[in-house]
Amino acid sequence: STPVATFCALLTAARMGVLVKGGDVLESLGEIKAVAFDKTGTITRGEFTVDMFDVVGHKVQMSHLLYWISSIESKSSHPMAAALVEHAQSKSIEPKPECVAEFRVLPGEGIYGEIDGMRIYVGNKRVLARGSSCQTVPERMNGLKGVSMGYVICDGDLVGVFSLSDDCRTGAAEAIRELASMGISSVLLTGDIAEAAMHAQEQLGGALLEEVHSELFPEDKVRLVGALKARAGPTMMVGDGMNDAPALATADVGVSMGISGSAAAMETSHATLMSSDILRVPEAVRLGRRARRTIA
Ligand code: ADP
Ligand code: MG
């Protein structure tokens, strides 16, 4: 193996916007047989629109709810958080992160925060279990299709519901098609609900994904990446680091999203996409294949 050939290939990768951490990673890229994609912020843009935001019951007023939620969410770097903060701002409510007494991320579920003496959970239907009173999903949430649904629990009571939607990145379908043409299978892994995963799948043109797994905890993503490695061979995981950093580390090649992703993901991953252009994924594999031929 010649160091010069490796260096040139790494430079080429960097020029096309893929930071590859070393020659061994480059070689692994050329061996990839399967790719596991995270959904939110990876296959999708991670730019959510709040389609619905409602108060439930009479315990809190809309203005208070928006103030609490946006203040707590302003401490989160999840793509959904930004949309909720913007929604509050569009109703002239400014978040006050300095008023949040306690803040915790609940992976695969949402967030917890304390503000004005209230204990608040925001997240998917799993947070309903954080409530003490009867927490049935409100009627109005049943007809919603293709969206992510959110719930707000305040001191044990369901006080708010919302729905968010997000679209696939341009180039996502083409990237998966490219990979298929190279004999590489793609699967989708998400912490989001099945309906939201299905919405993404439809936007991708349906049949491109070999498997779709939803409602995953970070450890489920690790397990599924492991299963893919055992079944298909060398596996790449592409994710934004929101609840998928352990899966990125488990994959033969973990690829983080450099612009929208978290700093922790850039550290645990083996390569980083410096743009939101998901088409760089098959290109990087091609480069790896070429490098293997030249270096070997
Ligand atoms: P994905 O695997 O699609 O990237 P995540 O694992 O990041 O999804 O998140 C899983 C789910 O947890 C989200 O779909 C959302 O319902 C909920 N969630 C996570 N973080 C937040 C947050 N800051 N606010 C509200 N809901 C959240
Ligand atoms: Mg994600």
Image (spheres, helix red, strand yellow):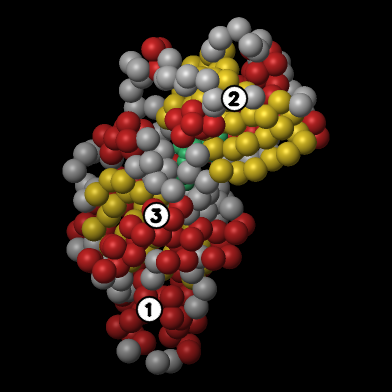
Residue at horizontal 55 percent and vertical 51 percent from the top: 261
Residue for badge 2: 156
Residue at horizontal 64 percent and vertical 29 percent from the top: 120
Does 41 appear above or below 294?
A: above
State the image quarter where residue 295 is shown.
bottom left
Under mark 1, the amino acid is: Glu
Residue for badge 3: 221
Residue labelled 3 has its Cβ within 8 Å of some atom of ligand 1: yes
Query: Marks 3/2: CA distance?
Result: 30 Å
Residue at horizontal 40 percent and vertical 66 percent from the top: 251
Frontmost residue, 212 versus 261: 212
Residue 222's spot in the image, x, y percent?
40, 59
Q: Is residue 96 left or right of residue 189?
A: right
State the image quarter where residue 130 is shown.
top right
Query: Marks 2/1: CA distance?
Result: 52 Å
Residue for badge 1: 27
Residue 226's spot in the image, x, y percent?
34, 65
Give the residue at the far bottom of this rendering: 1
Q: Is residue 82 left or right of residue 14?
A: right
